[in-house]
């Protein structure tokens, strides 16, 4: 059995994209990867539509937004930024860990009816699941 590796997913608010990424990685790849997530400017809570989008695919996520500062002594095998702001403001203290930027639209910025906003959350959820799981399955760093 392969050694479990760790991945830190960074976003600005740690309320939508990075939380969904953490949930999917731990759900699908928990035997190989331990995912954590954080934000450069963490929100008060995980966005309720992100939690609903995850629940729709059978994942009951209990995440809480955390500051990237909480990971100063954590040395993940890889850091993945999922928004441009987090990529630009990725802390230098993260050191030599491999950093990868895989951006996704921010569903929290969706406008319109609740149905229209939920549709964007689903779209982003599905892209995160597909792209990040595929990336980590093929990662050999």
Image (tube, rainbow, N blue to C red):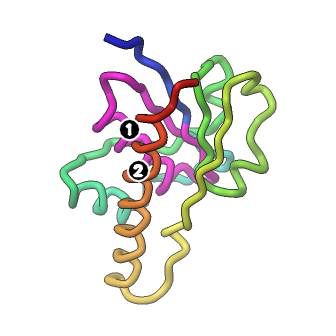
In what element is the residue under mark 2? helix
The magenta stretch spans which residues? 9-37
Front residue of 3/8: it is: 3
Residue 137 position, x and y percent, is 41, 35
Quick one: 135 or 57, which is closer to the camera? 135
Disc 2 marks which residue? 20
**Quadrant placement of the N terminus:** top left
Residue 47: x %, y % from top left: 43, 60
First of labels 2, 1 by sequence position: 2
- Would you call the spot at circle 1 few (<14 residues within 10 Å), some (14-19), or many (20 or more)? many
| Of marks 2 and 1, the one in the foreground | 1
Q: Nearer the viewer, residue 21 or 60?
A: 21
The residue carrying pointer 2 sits among few (fewer than 14), some (14 to 19) or many (20 or more) residues within 10 Å by Cα, namely: many
What residue is rendered at 32% in x and 28% in y? 30
> Which x, y percent locates residue 23?
36, 42
Instruction: From the viewer's perspective, tell me whether residue 78 is left or right of residue 99.
Output: left
Q: Residue at x 60, y 19 (%)?
A: 74
Quickly name the residue at label 1: 25
Q: Quadrant of residue 62?
A: top left
Q: Which mark is residue 61?
A: none
Residue 103: quadrant of the picture: bottom right
Residue placed at 52% from the left, 25% from the top? Answer: 140
Judged from the image, the secondary structure of the residue bearing numbered disc 1 is: helix
């Amino acid at each position: 059995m392969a050694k479990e590796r760790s991945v830190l997913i960074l976003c600005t608010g740690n309320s939508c994209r990075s939380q969904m990424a953490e949930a999917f990685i731990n759900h699908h790849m928990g035997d190989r990867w331990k995912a954590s997530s954080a934000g450069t400017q963490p929100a008060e809570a995980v966005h309720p539509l992100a939690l609903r989008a995850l629940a729709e695919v059978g994942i009951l996520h209990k995440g809480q937004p955390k500051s990237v500062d909480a990971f100063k002594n954590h040395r993940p095998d890889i850091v993945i930024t999922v928004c441009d702001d987090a990529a630009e403001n990725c802390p230098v203290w993260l050191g030599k860990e491999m950093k990868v930027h895989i951006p996704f639209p921010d569903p929290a910025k969706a406008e319109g009816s609740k149905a229209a906003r939920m549709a964007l959350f689903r779209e982003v959820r599905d892209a995160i699941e597909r792209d990040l799981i595929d990336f980590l399955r093929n990662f050999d760093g």
